[in-house]
Image (cartoon, grey):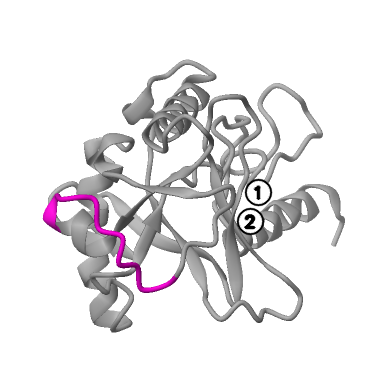
Amino acid sequence: TYKHPASGRGSYSFCLCPGGFVVAAATEKERVVTNGMSNYRRDSGIANSALLVQVAPADFGQEVLSGMALQQELEGLAFALGGRNYFAPVQTVGDFLKGTSGSTDFLTKPTYAPGVKASDLHRCLPDFITKTLAGALPYFDRKIPGLAAAAAVMRGVESRASAPGRTRRDRATFVAEATPGLYPMGEGAGYAGGIMSAAVDGMKAALAFLHQNVQY
């Protein structure tokens, strides 16, 4: 994990797939979404992981579906940047940090199908994301040498880490504000961004339920 010293915005690695592949995950026309997976043998010879940046309502607006609008905007920009044929835009870490683009001497061969196009990821991500990643990558590299190797390949965009909307719930009881008896939790309800955070949120919700409904 990393926190940008000026903005206080966080970044973290997410969903490492050992011996895996980067795959297409778009659900709408003219959008590009990346994701990662591993076959059961985990024998592709490479690993992949997402790098996420904290996004808050102040970044996209207060309407119920404002987060979804931002998500769709980024996915549409990635589609255009990749050549409008569902290729994913890619960039080496070295190019990303230097503000250049076009290098194709990748440390590992991109696995994304149908294909990739060397691009400048700054053109499909807002400044608050690229600036945070520019600080996070060298920091992560000091923790795990080689993670930010100049020829390491970045692909965009992974925009489905958590739900773009949030089901409002009481902070103490975890009960949905509009639906008594309903306990929204985890990624789908907008309260987590990964397996571990979803598990912890589910545990907290379960404990809140027991505290309210079980006689000791």
Residue 4 visible in this rendered orientation of the protein: no
Q: Kindly identify the residue that appears in the image at 12 percent across and 56 percent down.
A: 98
| Callout 2: SS | helix
Q: Amino acid at mark 2?
A: Ala
Is residue 12 placed above or below 66 in the rendered structure?
Answer: below
| Callout 1: SS | loop
Residue 198: mark in rendering: 2
* Residue 44 x %, y %: 61, 77
Q: Amino acid at mark 1?
A: Gly
Residue 50 vs residue 163: left or right? Answer: left
Could you tell me if the residues under marks 1 and 2 are in contact, i.e. CB atoms within 8 Å?
yes
Q: Quadrant of the C terminus?
A: bottom right
Residue 144: mark in rendering: none
Q: Quadrant of the N terminus?
A: bottom left
Q: Kindly identify the residue that appears in the image at 46 percent across and 68 percent down.
A: 109
Residue 182 picture quarter: top right
